[in-house]
Image (cartoon, rainbow, N blue to C red):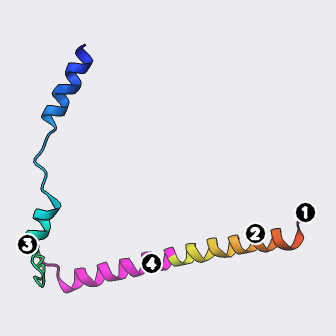
Amino acid sequence: MSSISGMITSLKNNKRTRVSTFDKLKNFKKGKSIQVAFDKEASSYQLKKIKEKLQEENKKLLKRNILIIIALISVIIYVIGFVKI
């Protein structure tokens, strides 16, 4: 019985007020742009470093993806061309 009472207590404690979808739609304002505010600003040097780092990471990802695609195509060509069924 203690496990059941523990479950009931847990359910009671985890309750939260749920906002209805209709309330969300009613309060939604069309055409309002969302403004994002940052407390800190990056210098032009920091922005340049971030840009370079992202470009380098993207190049590495592109190379890796190309190698994987080439390997998969090679395996598919091998299976189609040389394996006798």
Query: Mark 2 and mark 4: span between their CA atoms?
Result: 26 Å
Q: Which residue is mark 2?
A: 75
Which mark lies nearer to you, 2 or 4?
Answer: 2
> Which amino acid, mark 3?
Asp
Q: Which mark is residue 39?
A: 3
Considering the numbered disc 2 on the image, is that residue within a helix, a strand or a loop? helix
- Looking at the image, residue 85 sits to the left or right of residue 50; the answer is right
Considering the numbered disc 3 on the image, is that residue within a helix, a strand or a loop? loop
Q: Which mark is residue 85?
A: 1
| Residue positioned 26% across, 18% down in the render | 3
Residue 76 drawn at (x, y percent): 75, 71
Query: Mark 1 and mark 2: span between their CA atoms?
Result: 16 Å
Q: Main secondary structure of the magenta part?
A: helix
| Residue positioned 69% across, 70% down in the render | 72
Residue toward you, 75 or 19: 19
Query: Mark 4 and mark 3: span between their CA atoms?
Result: 28 Å
Residue 15 drawn at (x, y percent): 14, 40
> Which amino acid, mark 4?
Asn
Q: Which residue is mark 4?
A: 58
> Which amino acid, mark 2?
Val
Q: Crowdedness of circle 2 by 10 Å Cα count: few (<14), some, many (20+)?
A: few
Considering the numbered disc 1 on the image, is that residue within a helix, a strand or a loop? loop
Q: Crowdedness of circle 1 by 10 Å Cα count: few (<14), some, many (20+)?
A: few
The boundaries of the magenta stretch are 41-61
